[in-house]
């Protein structure tokens, strides 16, 4: 999608943005950097960032966030009277947070849980706070009142097309040019096969592209997470630490601790060792 936009001429009021959660595979960051370098396109690297505590409406959330700040050794104070903050920062390939930076206040996902508690499959604030709002706040900071949000969803992703075809009650309208043009996964793979670089994440015959997105995203299937943990057990350290320190879980049905301990296939809603 971006390549076609560039081929037609990138207009001054078109901004290419990448929101880094800090939990992506390093190859994802390498790929974004390759896109901006090889295609000579300016990409705005955005990260969630809060320097002050929010005003809590729930004491439970406040307590969970405080426990996580204590665990990570992060000190945040309430905002001074009348002072606001952007809520995001602009970084680049060199300064973007990596999975190894999770103990830093600047790590987007760590910063989020230390301010707002633990997201879960019912309250997916990570997508909202780490991706959607940084982009919104960036556009507002540039003086835009309304804009088009151009998304690379394919035509063979009907459920995602259905959801995104209805624009949110926000300042932007969703635009899905690939879906409108009938572009499928085959078309995308054929395009990248001809390029001098690619994302490079592995594909499993049964699990598909299991390495994409945040390394142990709560929306990944249990089988994908088991495979990721079996390959690199250290991937689970941050997620387990957050669950343990907060007393919360990213998925109530299968806390990460159970997945880490289990190497057996899942039967329905139960684990074989239960």
Image: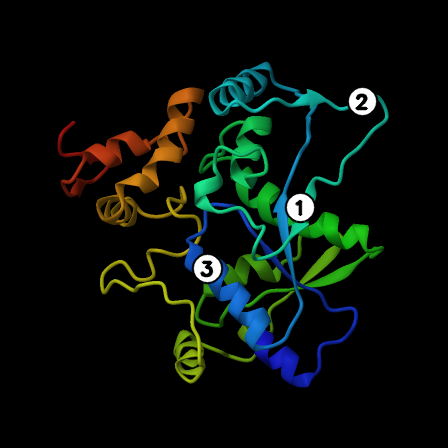
Residue with the mark numbered 1: 133
- Asked if one can make out residue 248 in the rendered structure from this viewpoint, the answer is yes
Q: Residue 28: which disc? A: 3
Residue extending furthest toward the front: 94
Give SS at disc 2.
Answer: loop
Residue with the mark numbered 2: 80
Image x and y of residue 29, in percent: 49, 58
Q: Of the residues tagged 2 and 1, which is closer to the observer?
A: 2
Image x and y of residue 252, in percent: 36, 30
Horizontally, is 80 left or right of 8 in the view? Answer: right
On screen, residue 190 above or below 14: below
Image x and y of residue 61, in percent: 56, 21
Q: Quadrant of the C terminus?
A: top left
Horizontally, is 70 left or right of 263 in the view? Answer: right
Q: Nearer the viewer, residue 76 or 223?
A: 76
Q: Nearer the viewer, residue 274 or 202?
A: 202
Q: Please tell me which residue is depicted at 58% across the width and 44% down the height of the picture.
A: 130
Q: CA distance from mark 1 to mark 3?
A: 21 Å
Q: Please tell me which residue is depicted at 63% across the width and 76% down the height of the picture.
A: 40
């Amino acid at each position: 999608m971006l390549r076609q936009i560039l081929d037609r001429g990138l207009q001054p009021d078109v901004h290419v943005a990448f929101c880094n959660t800090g939990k992506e595979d390093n190859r994802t960051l390498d790929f974004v950097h390759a896109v901006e370098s090889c295609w000579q396109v300016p990409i705005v690297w955005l990260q969630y960032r809060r320097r002050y505590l929010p005003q809590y409406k729930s004491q439970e959330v406040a307590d969970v966030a405080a426990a996580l700040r204590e665990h990570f050794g992060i000190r945040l104070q309430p905002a001074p009277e009348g002072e606001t903050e952007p809520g995001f920062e602009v970084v680049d390939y060199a300064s973007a947070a990596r999975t190894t930076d999770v103990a830093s206040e600047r790590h987007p996902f760590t910063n989020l849980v230390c301010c707002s508690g633990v997201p879960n499959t019912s309250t997916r604030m990570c997508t909202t706070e780490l991706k959607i709002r940084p982009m919104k706040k960036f556009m507002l900071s540039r003086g835009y009142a309304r804009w088009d949000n151009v998304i690379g969803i394919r035509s063979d992703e009907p459920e995602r097309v259905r959801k995104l075809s209805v624009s949110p009650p926000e300042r932007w309208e969703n635009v899905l040019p690939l879906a409108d043009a009938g572009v499928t996964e085959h078309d995308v793979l054929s395009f990248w096969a001809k390029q001098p670089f690619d994302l490079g994440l592995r594909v499993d015959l049964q699990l598909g592209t299991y390495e994409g997105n945040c390394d142990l995203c709560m929306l990944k299937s249990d089988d994908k997470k088991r495979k990721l943990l079996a390959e690199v057990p250290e991937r689970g350290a941050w997620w387990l630490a957050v669950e343990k320190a907060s007393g919360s879980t990213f998925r109530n049905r299968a806390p990460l601790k159970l997945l880490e301990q289990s190497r057996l296939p899942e039967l329905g809603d139960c684990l074989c060792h239960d």
